[in-house]
């Protein structure tokens, strides 16, 4: 609710002729620069701007903690030393107000670097009490729902999103230096594909057709490889109509890149180089701590084989699984399967016996062919496919294929998936006939990989929930807010 006392102050400001919401302000310096270059700036006049997050008065001297995008700077202001308009303003300021300050860089009696104000300009009057700076929001869901309040009061939350941007910048520069072209592919798609997931459905009024928010950009990036680009990548927003939990958000960021004339062996080395180099560059060491455990990104990463690991720990050979045996094995293993097919059982067995023990970066190689509809068969063993997934701290971070380039085989695998969809598997995609046609023009040998940016940031920043690394994660709308919005819309 709007604070009535602040509304009264706003009214008083108007009566004094002080604008509470001016158009612009000349911000010359940021807090971090003043602190870092104090010796050079001491005694010099500067102008700063930011939000007041602490306000106290000792006698006639006002002390304010001013926060800008770089950090904090203390402001000192005396009514007798500032301009007449500024003197009138000081007594009407509240925590949360955004102000501009012009003054001289100095140190307070306690030795804190400060700006001794000559003028104070109100830039935005805060009509609501912000979260207390040193404790922030205690309601975790409120932090996600109102992220602007979280980053206003929580410097750690701010830092995480700064590092998220640095991680993406590093990856982008890494790929650009290797001759990759950054591209954009459709979010609205007539046929969804490239992964097993339930899509969001929408309707295009003009075309009068149902369309889907993409679950993956894979098939469009492959079209570009077919068209003649040899190295392409995209940071894509993907959408999957799935549960919301610590590791899943219906809207997430996926990096996918594809390289012609390469295979999954090439990409294991490339992935090692990308991630190990990034961790060392951004954090100064190969080691990161996640949930109390040290994880080493020092190459080479460990390699294990999916079929062998599950067989060793369970006695089940998932390469030989048939759908007829699924129900019996699932019951024996105590696994509850919503969809009773061998794909879902193999995935559940991996979760039960292998995934939880993968701490340091580990490549899990060579999945059964029935789990890999877009992947080439393993050379020398047609039961398996040349696919790896990278796991760190028990989380899947990347998924890579030696891409299937035979259009006849691709059509057959799509038909198998479509049969599962028609049996009732909501995650099985339909056949993308346009993509098959594109393949029929000829697709070069290609390797492709998808890296989950959100989960990667979770690991590197040591947070246990994906909501901590997405600025505006999906949350259930509040009934009160919905009702309020509907009432205001109806006025």
Image (tube, helix red, strand yellow):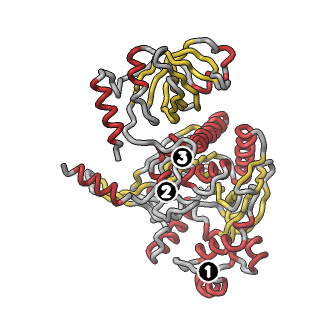
Circle 3 sits on which residue?
136
Crowding around mark 2 (Cα neighbors within 10 Å: few <14, some 14 to 19, many 20+) is: few
Mark 1 and mark 2 lie on one chain; the one further toward the N terminus is 2
| Picture layout, residue 156 above or below residue 318 | above
* Residue 17 horizontal/vertical position (percent): 30, 21
Q: Are marks 3 and 2 in contact (CB under 8 Å)?
A: no
| Picture layout, residue 448 above or below residue 198 | above
In the image, taking residue 379 as reference, residue 202 lies left or right, namely left
| Nearer mark to the viewer, of 3 and 2 | 3
Residue lying at the far left of the rendered structure? 491
Tell me what residue is drawn at x 32 percent, y 56 percent.
482
- Residues under labels 1 and 2: Cα distance? 31 Å
In the image, taking residue 224 as reference, residue 486 lies left or right, namely left
Crowding around mark 3 (Cα neighbors within 10 Å: few <14, some 14 to 19, many 20+) is: some
Circle 2 sits on which residue?
141
Mark 3 and mark 2 lie on one chain; the one further toward the N terminus is 3
Residue 335 disc label: 1
Tell me what residue is drawn at x 57 percent, y 60 percent.
246
* Residue 81 horizontal/vertical position (percent): 49, 14
* Residue 21 horizontal/vertical position (percent): 35, 28
Local SS, label 2: helix
| Picture layout, residue 89 above or below residue 5 | above
Local SS, label 1: loop
| Nearer mark to the viewer, of 1 and 2 | 2
């Amino acid at each position: 609710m709007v604070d009535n006392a602040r509304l009264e102050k706003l009214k008083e400001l108007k009566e004094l002729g002080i604008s509470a919401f001016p158009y612009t302000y000349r911000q010359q310096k940021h807090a971090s620069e003043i602190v870092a270059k104090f010796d050079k700036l001491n005694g010099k006049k500067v102008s700063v701007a930011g939000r007041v997050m602490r306000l106290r008065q000792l006698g006639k001297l006002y002390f304010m903690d001013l926060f800008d995008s770089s950090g904090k700077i203390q402001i000192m202001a005396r009514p007798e030393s500032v301009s007449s308009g500024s003197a009138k303003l000081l007594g009407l300021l509240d925590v949360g107000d955004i102000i501009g300050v012009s003054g001289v860089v100095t140190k307070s009696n306690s030795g804190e670097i400060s700006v001794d104000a000559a003028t104070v300009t109100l830039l935005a009057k805060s009509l609501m009490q912000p979260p207390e700076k040193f404790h922030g929001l205690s309601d975790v869901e409120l932090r996600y729902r109102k992220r602007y309040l979280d980053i206003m009061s929580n410097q750690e939350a701010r830092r995480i999103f700064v590092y998220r941007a640095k991680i993406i910048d590093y990856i982008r520069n890494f790929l650009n230096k290797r001759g990759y072209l950054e591209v954009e592919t459709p979010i609205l798609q007539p046929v969804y594909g490239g992964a097993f997931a339930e899509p969001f459905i929408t309707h295009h009024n003009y075309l009068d057709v149902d369309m889907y928010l993409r679950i993956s950009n894979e098939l469009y990036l492959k079209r570009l490889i077919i068209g003649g680009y040899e190295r392409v990548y995209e940071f894509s927003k993907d959408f999957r109509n799935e549960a919301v939990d610590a590791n899943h958000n219906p809207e997430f960021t996926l990096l996918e890149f594809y390289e012609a004339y390469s295979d999954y062996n090439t990409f294991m080395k490339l992935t090692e180089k990308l991630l190990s180099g990034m961790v060392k560059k951004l954090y100064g060491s190969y080691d990161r701590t996640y949930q109390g455990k040290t994880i080493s990104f020092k190459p080479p990463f460990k390699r294990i084989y999916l079929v062998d690991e599950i067989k060793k720990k369970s006695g089940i050979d998932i390469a030989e699984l048939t759908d007829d045996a699924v129900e019996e094995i699932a019951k024996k293993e105590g696994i509850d399967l919503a969809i009773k097919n061998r794909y879902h059982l193999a995935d559940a067995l991996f979760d039960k016996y292998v995934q939880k023990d993968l701490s340091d970066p580990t490549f899990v190689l060579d999945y059964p062919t029935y789990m890999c509809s877009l992947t080439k068969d393993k050379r020398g063993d047609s039961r398996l496919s040349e696919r790896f997934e990278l796991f760190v701290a028990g989380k899947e971070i990347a998924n890579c294929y030696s891409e299937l380039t035979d259009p006849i085989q691709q059509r057959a695998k799509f038909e198998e998936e479509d049969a599962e969809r028609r049996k009732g598997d909501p995650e099985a995609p339909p056949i993308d006939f346009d993509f098959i046609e594109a393949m029929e023009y000829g697709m070069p040998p290609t390797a492709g990989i998808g890296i989950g940016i959100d989960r990667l940031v979770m690991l590197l920043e040591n947070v246990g929930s994906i909501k901590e690394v997405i600025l505006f994660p999906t949350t259930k709308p509040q009934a009160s807010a919905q009702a309020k919005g509907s009432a205001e819309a109806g006025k």
